[in-house]
Amino acid sequence: MKVILAFHDSEAFDSELLNELIDILSFWRDRIPFVCLFSIKTSVELFQEKLQRTTTQLLQGVQFEVKQIDIDSIFKAAMSLHRPGLFWLGHTISSMVLQAQQDLLQSVASFSRSLQYASMTHMFANPLSVLLQEPLNGEMFPEQIYECIRNLPSFKVYAWREILYAYSLANQSRLAETLLDQREFSTLRQLLDDNLFLHKTVAEKLQSGRDSLSSLVAAVELLASLQSHINIKNRVSWTSLYIKAMAGQLKDSNLLEDIFTAVKRLPSDIMAHLLRDLKDSSVLDMSTFAEDLVQIESEKDHSNPLHSEYDTVHQNLRTTIVAHKVELSRYSSSLSKQDLLYSELVKRIGDNLKAYLDNVLINPQDLFLKEVLVFDLRTPYREVFGPKPRYAVERALNSAGDYLGCSCCKGAQHGLSPTQPALPILYQLYLESGAIINVSDLWSAFYTIVAEDGSEDEDAEQEKALYVLHDQDKQEEDRPSG
């Protein structure tokens, strides 16, 4: 294990303190490997002038350049719509992966491995991942799979919706005798008793759930494309849009209102580029609006772009003095015929975008079989990518047999066995001691454990115990690093 010290602003660091720190760390390098990262904004030569010659000789330097990693493109490719076994990462695990990348400055390979591990966890640790095979044909699954489906939280919610749907039918058609009194919830009963009916329902709902989540990701693409053409104060990245969408926080949000307002204020030339990009992305059909804009542009008698009534260009301030007080009021100037036509077109575009987003921006937590389509468990990722070095070292010292794999150490309890290595024995004795440790008592306890029972030659056994302790320390020193 290496201890890494990062100096973000090396030039501003005090030179005397830096020389003293490197000199102190050099005394520990035979036991603790230190790595110093210096952020140099000027040049290596100027940085070396701040260090003493003796300090420079203590360093083994390697010069490299830090490049910015485009995490958005990697995460976007991982969540693309064209991949086998289609499922998505939820907002919780996505936030954890991206936050770890920001805090720990992982490489591209480490970030990719974290995404791969999340996918492997869902595919291999979730028995219901067999439902992700495409297509889900008529071949039946084992009985346990259907029992797992019936115990899912999303199945219980779906069952309650079937009950409420039956009640609504009874109230609308006034068939209370047949549906309420006799409790003839046929669909719900088939879901609970008939595996074949449940199999067909799962196949249908999985496809509809995939379509809904694909449309949700397509809406994220649309919003990201809109942000590239408009000017808003708080621009949101693709990954942040994805996390908000998977959490069900985009619909009716302030971000959407800001985007709609900014789109309505676009001049005609930028609107033409926006409609062209939306047409190429095939997310939303805007060909009719593009043709109408071309028609309106052809009828104007000037080369300047058109502005809608929502644009601040047509809004002016009026100053009036009433009772020695200055009052400011806002009024709109008169619009030309082409500007009025363009305003109507902009309103239709905004209404179409709003209707589309209101339809596709769903909450994934409300989907049936969300446990299959969305992986959002934080515990497996945290146990693997959240390092716990203290816990790992303590467990290794307490249960050395689990790591050594030898039969002589597996039966030892609490590390107090002569077959155990010396370090676990000393560690267990350290835990059993008080605040003050007597070295003589510690050695006596260690000798009692290591020495064989029934020994007649005490001096020979003490020498053997010292040899065991020294020999294991020597093996640790001779063991190659890495």
Image (cartoon, rainbow, N blue to C red):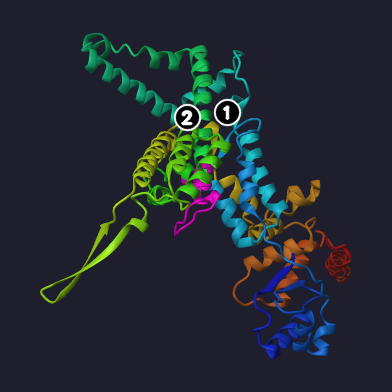
Q: Quadrant of the C terminus?
A: bottom right
Inspect the magenta stretch and tell me whether residue 217 lies in it. Answer: no
Q: Quadrant of the N terminus?
A: bottom right
Give me the residue at 60% from left, 35% from top.
81
Residue 364: x and y in percent read 46, 36
Residue 400: x and y in percent read 74, 54
- What amino acid type should be assigned to the residue bearing mark 2? Leu
Circles 2 and 1 in contact, beta carbons < 8 Å: yes
Judge whether 290 appears above or below 110 on screen: above
Q: Is residue 328 left or right of residue 158?
A: left
Query: How many residues crowd mark 1 within 10 Å: few (<14), some (14–19), many (20+)?
Result: some
Residue 198: x and y in percent read 49, 17
Residue 439: x and y in percent read 72, 77
- Name the residue carrying label 2: 152
In this rendered view, identify the residue nearer to me: 319 or 223: 319
Give me the residue at 13% from left, 77% from top.
324
Give me the residue at 40% from left, 26% from top.
158
What range is drawn magenta here?
Answer: 221-244
Disc ID at residue 128: 1
Q: Earlier along the polypeptide chain: callout 2 or callout 1?
A: 1
Judge whether 337 appears above or below 6 on screen: above
Q: Is residue 480 left or right of residue 222?
A: right
The answer, for residue 376, to whether it is visible in the render is no
The answer, for residue 329, to whether it is visible in the render is yes
- Secondary structure under badge 1? helix
In this rendered view, identify the residue nearer to me: 301 or 291: 301
